[in-house]
């Protein structure tokens, strides 16, 4: 059965916004890396009791990032347009979410889909092209795998094509419909030419089947364990 995905995809100009990131540990480092990999000039304020050395190093390479050592307080929200919560304190995350909501700020609470206003995605980049993958929170691991599939499938020449397209568009004459027709003709070979890589349908089917079998085996093992240790019975 397929599950619908009602998420609305957008590409944020994050470098024009003020980002607040709460938490300077492993998950905070992952979120900061994702932010700066995509939007390196973003003004990010990171507030945390402690910071991983790797996060300090990353911040040092990005002049618009500010580190504040100390406990989170709601006052930080007054200087923010968008918020990422990435501490190890779920109660604090609920507080941040509630305070942000009264200020109409959008919040990502790392690894906690129910509290997120938006999710991060797996990102494939080839020059100017960027593809964002979401599984609607079903499996970040599958999103990561898909990123690798798309990275391999998309030709490196894609960026060269993209770089040339504005000049080609400018040279075209005629009305909008004629230009679209000409651009369609120029790019027709891209959709099924010799470089096209067929989707690895069989491999994906095998993983789906394997995952089902593995889940079944896990459930059976648990069932076996719980049936030999009925609820409430102690060893
Ligand atoms: C894409 C990516 C972007 C990024 O974070 O930059 C991302 N997670 C990534 C990796 C990853 N995260 C986790 C694993 C371990 C294995 C696993 O659980 O699969 C791995 C895999 C790994 O690290 O190998 C743990 C995890 N993550 C979430 C939960 C909660 C839950 O699932 O209920 C748990 C369980 C926590 C626990 O068990 O305690 C939830 C979310 N993670 C999302 C994004 C959002 C949904 C994206 C979507 O729609 O697919 C969402 C909903 C919210 C958010 O965090 O934005 C990045 C891949 C980057 C890349 O490599 O391309
Ligand atoms: N590390 C992972 O890959 C991973 C994977 C899945 C789930 N998780 C979960 O995600 C959570 C975070 O994991 P982590 O590895 O980043 O933890 P961590 O301990 O490395 O980082 C937590 C950070 O939050 C900061 N913090 C705590 N209270 C704060 C406060 N009041 N104000 C400001 N900063 C505060 C700490 O100083 C620390 O820097 C944990 O609950 C963990 O179980 C982690």
Image: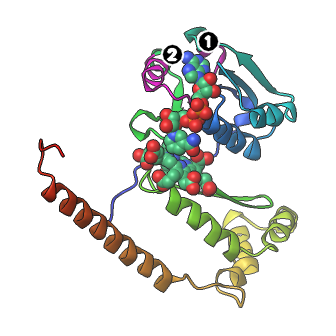
The x and y percentages for residue 49 are 64, 18
For mark 1, what is the residue?
A: 78
Q: Is residue 172 above or below residue 108?
A: below
Nearer-the-camera pick, 215 or 156: 215
Residue 110 visible from this viewpoint: no
Which stretch did the figure color magenta? 76-98
Residue drawn at (73%, 46%) of the image? 38
The x and y percentages for residue 152 are 69, 74
The x and y percentages for residue 170 are 85, 62
Report the colour scheme. Answer: rainbow
Nearer-the-camera pick, 57 or 14: 57
For mark 2, what is the residue?
A: 103
Distance in Å between CA atoms under marks 1 and 2: 8 Å
Q: Is residue 209 above or below residue 163?
A: below
Residue 74 visible from this viewpoint: yes
Tag on residue 115?
Answer: none
Nearer-the-camera pick, 175 or 81: 81
Determine the secondary structure under disc 1: helix
- Taking the image as shown, residue 56 lies to the left or right of residue 153, namely right
Residue drawn at (46%, 23%) of the image? 97
Nearer-the-camera pick, 183 or 30: 30
Determine the secondary structure under disc 2: loop
Task: Please report whichever mark, 1 or 2, sits nearer to the chain's N-terminal start.
Answer: 1
Residue drawn at (79%, 30%) of the image? 56
Toward the bottom, the furthest residue is 194
Residue drawn at (71%, 27%) of the image? 51
The x and y percentages for residue 124 are 68, 60
CB under 8 Å between discs 1 and 2? yes
- Taking the image as shown, residue 90 lies to the left or right of residue 154, namely left
């Amino acid at each position: 059965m397929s599950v619908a995905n009602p998420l609305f995809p957008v590409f944020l100009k994050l470098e024009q916004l003020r980002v607040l990131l709460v938490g300077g540990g492993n998950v905070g480092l992952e979120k900061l890396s994702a932010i700066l990999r995509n939007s390196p000039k973003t003004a990010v304020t990171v507030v945390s009791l402690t910071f991983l050395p790797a996060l300090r190093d990353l911040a040092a390479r990005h002049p618009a990032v500010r580190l504040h050592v100390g406990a989170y307080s709601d006052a930080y929200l007054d200087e923010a347009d968008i918020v990422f919560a990435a501490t190890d304190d779920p109660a604090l995350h609920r507080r941040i979410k509630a305070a942000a909501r009264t200020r109409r700020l959008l919040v990502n609470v790392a690894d906690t889909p129910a509290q997120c206003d938006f999710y991060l995605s797996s990102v494939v980049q080839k020059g100017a092209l960027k593809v964002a993958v979401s599984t609607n929170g079903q499996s970040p691991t599958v999103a990561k795998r898909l990123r690798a599939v798309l990275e391999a499938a998309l030709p490196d020449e894609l960026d060269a094509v993209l770089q040339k397209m504005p000049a080609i568009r400018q040279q075209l004459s005629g009305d909008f419909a004629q230009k679209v027709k000409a651009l369609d003709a120029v790019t027709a070979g891209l959709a099924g030419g010799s470089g096209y890589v067929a989707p690895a349908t069989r491999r994906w089917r095998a993983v789906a089947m394997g995952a089902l079998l593995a889940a079944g085996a896990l459930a059976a093992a648990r069932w076996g364990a719980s049936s030999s240790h009925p609820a409430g019975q102690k060893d």
